[in-house]
Amino acid sequence: MTSEVDETPGTGEALGYEQARDELIEVVRRLEAGGTTLEESLALWERGEELAKVCRQWLEGARARLDAALAEETAEDEDAE
């Protein structure tokens, strides 16, 4: 028996933020809709956790880049004074 969860392509690290977010939305939609077996629901939940982690890593990376850019801008402003 093959479920749609087993056919999910790629690993978490290879996904971009938007792709992981969109897949996570689909996982949540399927879980909320119900009608899956316990095994399928658990597989969906695990995939959702994986996707949420990928999204979190992308957002933390973006935050770090913004913080670095702001710190650089502040340092340049202080040097100009």
Image: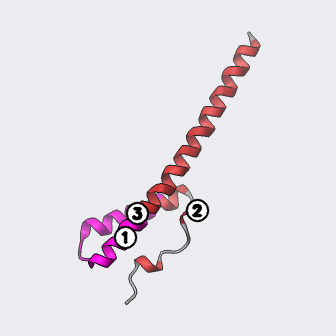
What amino acid does circle 1 point to? Answer: Leu
- The reply to whether the magenta stretch includes residue 46 is yes
Residue 61: name its quadrant. top right
- For disc 3, the marked residue is 48
Compared with 1, 73 (above or below) is above
Residue at image position (69%, 27%) is: 72
Measured from the top left, where is residue 23 in percent x and y? 44, 65
Element under disc 3: helix
**Magenta-tinted stretch:** 21-48
Of pointers 3 and 2, the one earlier in the residue sequence: 2
Measured from the top left, where is residue 63 in percent x and y? 56, 39
Compared with 34, 70 (above or below) is above
Magenta stretch prevailing secondary structure: helix
What amino acid does circle 3 point to? Answer: Gly
- For disc 2, the marked residue is 13
- For disc 1, the marked residue is 44
Quadrant of the drawing holding the N terminus: bottom left
- The reply to whether the magenta stretch includes residue 13 is no
Residue at image position (27%, 76%) is: 38
Quadrant of the drawing holding the C terminus: top right
User: Given contact means CB atoms under 8 Å apart, are the residues at marks 1 and 3 in contact?
Assistant: yes
| Left or right relative to 76: residue 41 | left
